[in-house]
Image: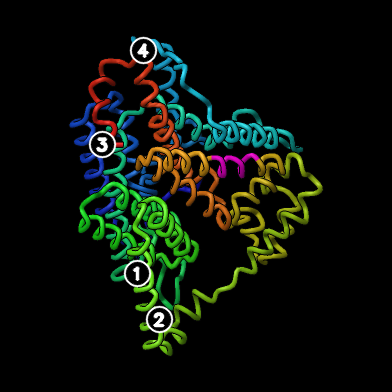
Amino acid sequence: MEPVVLKVVGSHVVGMLFVYMYFIIALFLSARWVGNSGVKYKFETLILAFYLMTGNLNDLLTFAIPGVSFFEIQPDRFIFFMFLFFLVRRFYFSNEPFEVKVSWRIPWFVIMLICYLLFKMISLGSHPGSILFPELIIKSLHVINALVIIFSLRIMFSPELIEIFGKALLVGAIVTCLVSFVQIGIDPMFARTGDIRIAFGEVYRVNGIFNAEYFNSYYLIIASTWALTKYEDGFKKLGLVLMYSIGIFLTFHRMSWLLFFLVLAIYFLVLAKPQMDKLLLAGMGGVIVLLVLFLIFQREIVNSTLVKERVTETVDSRFGYYDMVFDNIGDKPILGYGNHDNEVYYYSMLHITRMRERATGAAGGIHSGYLSAMFYYGIPAFMFFTLFVLSTIIYFAKLYLKTSKPIFSITFVLAFVYGIANITNTLLFAEFLGLFLAIFLGLGLGARYYDKEKEEGTTPEQEQVFQQYKNVV
């Protein structure tokens, strides 16, 4: 992993003071929320709240182990070791013996994720010049980390965890919006740690506190869903969602616009259980307003730089990537090609892009999580990853329709966003959104069995918070 640094203009590091001040504020808020709560596992909760609140800016906290040049402690790896230690401590050194409840079930999406991991590891270790076992574990660590997080949060779950992580999400979304406003209106390099992409003309897409504009928008989509489902106060809800909507628009990421529209449609048509006559009236009113604005400003809209340079941009190169996968997977259908260090990937990408850094895998990629899983690890891995996404969406959709608990609606929307986003981006579990999903999958599973475990008998601590459950979750 290349070192993450803030963008430098001349000799000036843009936004350095803001970033480290925000780290201090995020740590203070996390500590205050955890300290005022009754959560049992305070250190783990504090670290996760800080992680959720700081986005990809926390990559700046990466550090190397002295004498070990090939392995850095990145935030996601720190979380992995933290939860691995938590599980060891919980199983072997806790005063309270760990008991497997009768009501516990391993859901299908966890089984599919385990199968995907196994095929990935077999693929990585089966090709000529295969990597050694330690490196194989490192290259598979993101998926292992997701499973460790899911299981750990399943054990740690309490209603107060949801409240703390919800606050962290909303605060992080407000901050990434404010950073986005500065990036679009004052300085496009402000607190920017990742991609620098043109939206249109001389306007850059905004990354906020993330390293790419689509992570910024996906985070805001989830925060919007949280605000819509958790707040009864109409003005607070409207204010937050309006701010987040502007942040999503300023990313100029077409898939995010489409996803946000779909999420709003799902919310208003299904999750909010609205009165259909009011919904129809609001929808017709919105369409009429849009038509009037288009008719008035038709010439300006059609001839604008945004429409010419962003909305009409083609995606022919991505179809070239997809054709490359389908043209070559027949030669290695079971275990794929292992990685991008092979002649098929190199010459195909060189032919498609005419760019050596893309051909070597130093930049870019296949631009689809599903097809990346197929090309690198084989058709079975592709099937298991696809089934993982579909079974997750179905699992939490059913839970929400059955119980109407907001935690299930949030996890369902997050899984839906993750599934759609992987159509045109290779996210898998190596990026922020993958860990974000794993955190809420663990919370969702914890919430799923909370009532049943109450019936089986709980600890006195659980007894005290159980009565809060229905109002909080």
Q: x and y percent of residue 145 in the render?
A: 49, 33
Q: Is residue 383 above or below residue 16?
A: above
Neighbor class of circle 4 (other Cα within 10 Å; few <14, some 14-19, many 20+) is few
Looking at the rendered structure, the secondary structure element under dot 3 is helix
Is residue 194 visible in the rendered image? The answer is no
Q: Residue at x 20, y 30 (%)?
A: 35
Question: Label 1 amino acid?
Answer: Leu
Q: Amino acid at mark 3?
A: Asn
Residue matched to label 1: 281
Describe the element under mark 2 as helix, strand or loop. helix
Of all residues, the one furthest to the front in this rendering is: 277
Identified by mark 4, the residue type is: Ser
For label 1, count other residues whose C-alpha is less than 10 Å away and answer few (under 14), some (14-19) or many (20+).
few
Lateral position of residue 393 relative to residue 464, left or right: right
Disc 4 target residue: 94
Given residues 297 and 464, the one toward you in this image is: 464
The residue under label 3 is 471
3 or 1: mark nearer the eye = 1
Q: Which of pointers 2 and 4 lies earlier in the amino acid sequence?
A: 4
Label 4: element kind? loop
Left or right of residue 281, residue 239 in this image: left
Counting every numbered tag in the picture gives 4
How many residues crowd mark 2 within 10 Å: few (<14), some (14–19), many (20+)? Answer: few
* Residues shaded magenta: 384-391
Which disc, if any, is residue 156?
Answer: none
